[in-house]
């Protein structure tokens, strides 16, 4: 990264307060003018079990983890071995643990990190009401350069509902941790910047997705809770009534998508959020929305599959079902944010496009992005909200053609209750008035119409984030959460004097061949980066675009994320 960063892990059992300590750390980072990126990993248990938060703090925006962590603080060692592959350490790393909690797992010890003792439970017992996670918080703050005044402000803000005794106990435990860390080996420290918390947001990808939905005009949500998409619904549930909207918890995924089709048919922009197993159940109704030209948005926060897979881990393996999962020729929109912050814009844009084009839009985020919490610059309010084309008054004796074969492919859409504009809307093929038809000419005309409205629309520059050197002969092409490590790899390569370009695709479908060709003008080599076992994105690009002769793929399944160093290594070896 262009600025300073420090990377750390806090781990422990499900009741150790790991996530609480990480969240407090991010809030203090925001007040210090820093940026942050925090992901969490946990087992499949509903309650308890092991937990870890992986955090990277920086003086400049950060959107991915580094190749290794500078230190790990283990409040206890409970099942930490399950996270070993997700927590790369090295000889220069510190392994900080409680000597009263036994020995570190061999899988962690083998990485060669320097062992440092921090008796968190013993120190916590010396503080009335003290907790080990606050001891850990104090040690971390001292190590990385957080000032006490900032931390005390954060503690008081977060604990004021628990009363003065809880605040005093946490402050005392925090100070005990600071004192204990005085003799620890040095790790990177960050300097406070002039920017304060008023210029920073602490937000998750799922929260940003919910905010983007509201900004886009969504006022009805129906969904069934599912990991890791539930937080989208939890954020929207109290937010929707404030703008006159409604959220309904449906009995299952089939009910939720059919309810939003009904809500949208009634004229209200509608959305549901789910994960891979839920999307699989929704595909038949997605086809109905395509055929009936009803705009809806489906957010898929992807997780490891197939089937139930690993519910708490991330993977970019729903691409194929999102693009190809509908039976028949059923063109629709598929979009993917390129960062936690971009979840807001991409979801808002998806609502806009769905309403304008009267079609379903699938938004692909994933567990790593959706449940990641980031400290980002405050998002500017972008003033666009999709407006459906509505019919004008009919002349006497003229029948309303809901599916009129217009040059753009978009037909005026009436809502129930408009006098004279009744029509049939279902999954059967139909003619221009909506009357079911089995005629080849009607089928051909409606197929052409539904495709034309997507391929003929001008999506502008939002289709992808393009950065790097204009004259580069090597390009990294990626999508979704893999864009974060790809951006950092780009910076590293350019700092070494290599000319490289990055294309992070936001609009997956429909494809943009002319824009893609211009973005890769002069490029002779492409590295495609993604998190899937079979290289779904790589194969999709090969099928849909004209690519240079030299194309390589860097793809791996979840739950291990792609690291910037792996991308740099691939490009360097290729060169």
Image (cartoon, helix red, strand yellow):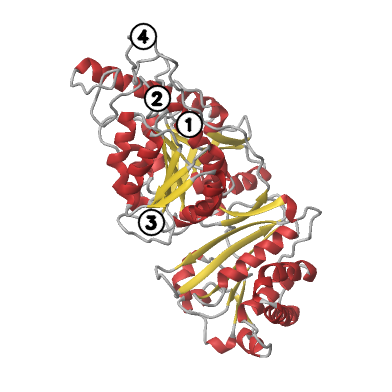
Q: Taking 473 as reference, is 282 left or right? A: left
The residue indicated by pointer 2 is 418
Q: Secondary structure at mark 3?
A: loop
The residue indicated by pointer 4 is 396
Residue 53 in which image quadrant: bottom right
CA distance for labels 4 and 3: 57 Å
The circle on residue 470 is none
Q: Does label 1 or label 4 sit earlier along the sequence?
A: 1
Query: Mark 2, mark 3: which one is toward the viewer?
Result: 2
Q: Does label 2 or label 4 sit earlier along the sequence?
A: 4
Can residue 77 be seen from the camera position used here? yes
CA distance for labels 3 and 1: 28 Å
Q: Does label 3 or label 1 sit earlier along the sequence?
A: 3
Q: Are marks 2 and 4 in contact (CB under 8 Å)?
A: no
94 above or below 497? below
Q: Nearer the viewer, residue 364 or 168?
A: 168
Which residue is located at x 29 percent, y 37 percent? 326
């Amino acid at each position: 990264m262009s600025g300073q960063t420090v990377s750390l892990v806090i781990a422990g059992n499900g009741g150790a307060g790991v996530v609480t300590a990480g969240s407090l750390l991010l809030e203090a980072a925001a007040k210090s003018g820093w940026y942050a990126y925090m992901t969490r990993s946990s087992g499949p248990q509903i309650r308890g079990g092991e937990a870890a938060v992986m955090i990277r703090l920086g003086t400049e925006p950060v959107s991915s983890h580094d190749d290794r962590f500078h230190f790990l603080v283990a409040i206890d060692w409970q099942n930490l071995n399950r996270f070993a592959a997700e927590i790369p350490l090295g000889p220069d790393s510190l392994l900080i643990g409680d000597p009263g909690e036994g020995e570190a797992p061999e899988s962690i010890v083998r990485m060669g990190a320097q062992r440092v003792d921090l008796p968190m439970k013993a120190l916590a017992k010396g503080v009335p009401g003290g907790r080990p996670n606050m001891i850990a918080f104090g040690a971390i703050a001292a190590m990385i350069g957080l000032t006490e005044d900032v931390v005390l402000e954060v503690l008081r803000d977060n604990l004021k509902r628990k009363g003065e005794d809880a605040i005093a106990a946490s402050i005392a435990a925090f100070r005990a941790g600071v004192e204990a860390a005085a003799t620890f080996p040095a790790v990177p420290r960050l300097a406070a910047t002039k920017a304060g918390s008023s210029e920073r947001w602490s937000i998750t990808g799922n929260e940003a997705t919910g905010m983007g939905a509201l900004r886009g005009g969504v006022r009805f949500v129906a969904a069934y809770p599912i990991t890791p998409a539930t937080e989208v619904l939890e954020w929207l549930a109290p937010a929707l009534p404030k703008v006159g909207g409604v959220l309904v918890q449906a009995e299952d995924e089939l009910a939720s998508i059919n309810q939003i089709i009904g809500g949208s048919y009634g004229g209200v922009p509608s959305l549901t959020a789910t994960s891979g197993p839920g999307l699989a159940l929704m595909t038949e109704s997605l086809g109905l929305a395509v055929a009936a030209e009803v705009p809806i948005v489906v957010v898929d926060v992807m997780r490891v599959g197939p089937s139930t897979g690993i519910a708490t881990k991330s993977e970019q393996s729903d691409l194929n079902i999102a693009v190809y999962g509908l039976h028949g020729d059923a063109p629709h929109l598929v979009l993917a944010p390129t960062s936690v912050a971009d979840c807001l814009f991409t979801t808002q844009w998806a609502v806009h496009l769905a309403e304008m084009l009267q079609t379903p839009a699938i938004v692909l985020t994933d567990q790593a992005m959706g449940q990641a919490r980031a400290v980002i610059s405050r998002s500017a309010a972008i003033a666009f909200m999709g407006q459906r084309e509505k019919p004008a008054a009919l002349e006497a004796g003229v029948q309303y053609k809901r599916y009129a074969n217009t040059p753009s492919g978009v037909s005026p859409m009436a809502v129930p209750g408009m006098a004279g504009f009744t029509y049939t809307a279902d999954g059967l093929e139909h003619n221009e008035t909506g009357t079911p038809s089995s005629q080849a000419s009607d089928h051909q005309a409606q197929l052409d119409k539904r495709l034309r409205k997507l391929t003929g629309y001008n999506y502008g520059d939002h289709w992808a984030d393009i950065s790097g050197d204009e004259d580069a002969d090597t390009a990294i092409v990626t999508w979704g959460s893999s864009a974060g490590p790809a951006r950092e790899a780009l910076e590293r390569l350019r700092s070494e004097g290599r000319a490289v370009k990055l294309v992070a695709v936001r609009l997956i479908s429909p494809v943009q061949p002319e824009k893609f060709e211009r973005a890769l003008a002069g490029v002779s080599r492409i590295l495609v980066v993604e998190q899937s076992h079979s290289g779904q994105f790589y194969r999709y690009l090969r099928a849909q675009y004209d690519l240079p002769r030299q194309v390589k793929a860097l793809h791996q399944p979840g739950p291990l994320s792609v690291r910037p160093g792996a991308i740099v290594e691939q490009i360097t070896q290729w060169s």
